[in-house]
Amino acid sequence: MKGDFFQRNEISTLRRDWDSEQTQAYIRELPIWTGDIQIEQKFGGLQNRTYFVTDGDGERYAVRCGFDQYRTRQTSVVNCTIGAAKLGLGPKLRYAEPSLTITDFIKGPKMQEAQLREPKMMAHVIERIKALHEGSDAVEETMSYWWVFQTIRRYLNAMEKGKAATGFKPSQWLDEVPRFRDITYRLERAIGPFTPTFTHNDLAYVNMIFGDDGQVLFIDWDGGGFGHPMWDLGEMLMWLESDEEMNRFAFGCYFGKLDEPAMQKLLHEHRAFQIMASLRLITEIMETDLDPYFYLTPEEMAESMQEFFPGEQAHLNGLIDLLRPNFERMWAKYGDDYP
């Protein structure tokens, strides 16, 4: 593949029940490669398979395979990836079909937590986020609408009912459902009217990579769609466990000078989004436990968890144990500040 090549296929025979070897064989047969390819699996995702491919001409590409699951709809992933590339905010899409995308490989390093905490870097990232939010016209086809409160309610409903893969047994965390549902409704009331924009909706620092020109690019558009612009800031800052000083700095970068009433309103909504970002992760993992190997094998799941959380327990309970303390701290502080 060279130049401005892009091909879209509306039909795919990629199967969810294939193992990684069958998936790689399918990728090798795609009619887009120049000569023989080299392919290696990259672990890290808990829902998708990712491969790095070197084409016969020496060019490298990233191949992502996934299926509709949780909040992700594959047609939306494709359209958001195309839109982000048009804006210069993501890698260029080269090939797409239902459940599979191929983008240019980004050679630069990934963002590190300590880097993002630096004021100059945070200001740069927020400038890129703002460009995304102002670029909704770049998405020419249908994309999803992201409202975290409804997504979590769906997760909680699934935890009550169970899933066929595990015999429709309720979640082992069933006792948590009423409390999580109450928190969700309470925090939803903190959000005022807004204009939906093009949002990424999973802006952890691990989804930021430096391009050749040093500009930050965003990858992993599983959650991309129309949404609340402050969600992206809330989720990014949740991963940094930001304090009020950092939050005020971030809003200053995004909005410019704000009077104190406007700042206080934003801080209130932001705190709600930060808590919901944490709760979304926790409840998504709890739902995953109802069908843990929907696509990935147990071995792939363990590899991915060790890639993202080295030294932690390689099972879903370990992830929840890792995430819960910050969620509980944020919720307790919110109750103190907004009784």
Image (tube, rainbow, N blue to C red):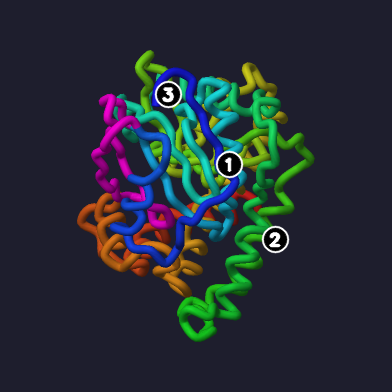
Q: What element carries label 3?
A: strand
- Residue type at tag 3: Val
State the extent of the magenta-drawn residues as a range: 34-60
Kindly identify which residue carries mark 1: 224
Location of mark 3 (residue)? 216
Task: State which quadrant residue 28 falls in.
Answer: top left
Label 2 near label 3: C-beta < 8 Å?
no
Is 48 magenta? The answer is yes
Front position among marks 2 and 1: 1
Position in image of residue 277 (x %, y %): 53, 50
Q: Residue 188: x percent and y percent?
A: 70, 53
Which secondary structure lies at badge 1? loop
Q: Closer to the camera, 232 or 270?
A: 232
Q: How far apart are the alpha carbons under marks 2 and 1? A: 23 Å
Determine whether label 2 and label 1 are within 8 Å by CB.
no
Q: Name the residue under label 2.
A: 185
